[in-house]
Amino acid sequence: MTKKICILGSTGSIGVQTIDVAKKLGIRVVGLSANKNVDLLIKQARELNPDILCIVDEKYYAILKENFPDKIVVAGQKGLISVATYPAADLIVNALVGVSGLVPTVEAILAGKRVALANKETLVTGGKIIKRILSQKQAKDSLPLLIPVDSEHSAIFQCLVGEDKKNVKKIILTASGGPFRGKKLKDLQSVNVEDVLKHPTWNMGKKITVDSATLINKGFEVIEAMFFFDKRCDDIDVVIHPQSIVHSMVEFVDGAIKAQLSYPDMRLPIEYALTFPERSREIVMPLELTKIKNLTFEEPDFDTFFLLKIAYECAKKGESYPIVLNAANEEAVKYFLERKIGFVDIMNYVTKIIERHREQKVESIQDILEIDAEARQKFKNLVEGEKN
Ligand SMILES: NC(=O)C1=CN([C@@H]2O[C@H](COP(=O)(O)OP(=O)(O)OC[C@H]3O[C@@H](n4cnc5c(N)ncnc54)[C@H](OP(=O)(O)O)[C@@H]3O)[C@@H](O)[C@H]2O)C=CC1
Ligand SMILES: CC(=O)[C@@H](O)[C@H](O)COP(=O)(O)O
Ligand SMILES: [Mn+2]
């Protein structure tokens, strides 16, 4: 079992829950990182006594070092990589948000670390390259180097234990449907930030909560599943399951379907990733089946939540398309949370950027970062241009 971990993004929703799980399991946290939230990072470090601390925003370096003069204190992108590759760690939990998670995942794998991956944007943008790197890198214990934390992918990963990959016919990803399930585009014109951040079943960071509301989160998860489980997007279905109890399913060639069920609580997939291939005896929250009256499933509304359709198209086209989709969406969500554009604008602007995009081949991480930067600039030009 994992004994020592570093947590990238320890001050976020997944980061904080990972600390909870690590404490419960008696796992030592040797490294922590935050972007700007130096107060919470200091509090976490006082409690956990890690060896290495990183604050990405360099203006907080001095205050962090002042509080921990005897620790390794680092800052910036280079500092983040030092935590991702910290020699004493057995496993790196990547709980960063956005494409900022890509390079740390790559560097951790190259350094021979196992990565518990919550940061889905790593595979959305870098799936092809990560797959190539993984094929050249083998763990000493021959277990996978990349373990999913995203609840759906953890569910699928658990369903696949002991199964032969060639017997998998289809992956069925469940989606809550978000706060606007059942609504039509005309109902969404006037929704505000507060409405969007009211997720019906999960309590998560702001960016992924907005993504759940547009359903692009599920589109990203289709791409994430393609790389985690070596499937084409045509073999990955999405089904709306408003209760968020069935976290995803695998259909086999004989027609059998396996599923993983639990309450919507990320501490279970985090715990599984930290203990894999074992299971902890610490129960996160036992599921009381007789109290759950209904488990329902319905088709997604691709017309209203059309970014899900666009995401499937980008998944199929591959190469630069998923990178541009992610970059445009990250910018759109930022603008939305700053109240500069509306909710439906997120969907319309991202669609426009994708419609105008022409494929670029992706051969390296550098290519990804350049395509990402270019797409963000195009997004800004589009929005600012329309405003003026
Ligand atoms: N939350 C959830 O339940 C789930 C999340 N995920 C995925 O997990 C990842 C993390 O999500 P979540 O925990 O909700 O996100 P949060 O926004 O809550 O946390 C993000 C963390 O990353 C840090 N961070 C933000 N931007 C940067 C940057 N540019 N460079 C370095 N560090 C940065 C933040 O630091 P600071 O606090 O200082 O800003 C924070 O520690 C996402 O990819 C999400 O899609 C997947 C399934 C469920
Ligand atoms: C908890 C988790 O894994 C999220 O990705 C979740 O799936 C979001 O909910 P939606 O199903 O609404 O996208
Ligand atoms: Mn998920």
Image (cartoon, grey):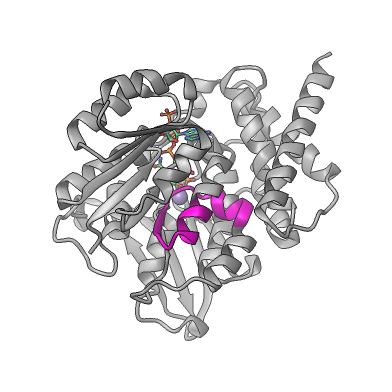
354 left or right, relative to 217: right
Whether the magenta-drawn stretch holds residue 117 is answered as yes
Name the residue at 62% across, 28% down: 188
Q: Is residue 355 above or below residue 129?
A: above
> Residue 260, image x and y in percent?
34, 63
| Relative image position of residue 157 (x, y in whole percent) | 40, 67
Q: Nearer the viewer, residue 253 or 27?
A: 27
Q: Is residue 385 visible?
A: yes
Residue 67 image point, x, y percent: 27, 21
Q: Nearer the viewer, residue 331 or 288?
A: 331
Q: Residue at x 37, y 58 (%)?
A: 246
Residue at 41 percent across and 57 percent down: it is 115
Quadrant in which the C terminus is drawn: top right
- 155 inside magenta stretch: no
Which of the two residues, 99 or 48, is positioned nearer the viewer here? 48
In this view, the residue in front, 63 or 222, is 63
Q: Is any part of residue 12 visible from this angle? A: no
Identify the image quadrant of residue 154.
bottom left
* Residue 278 pos. (x, y %): 23, 68
Q: Is residue 230 left or right of residue 16?
A: right
View extreme (top): residue = 388
The quadrant in which the N terminus is found is bottom left
Q: Residue at x 28, y 57 (%)?
A: 274
Q: Which region is colored magenta?
A: 105-126
Q: How many marks?
A: 0
- 254 in relation to 308, above or below: below
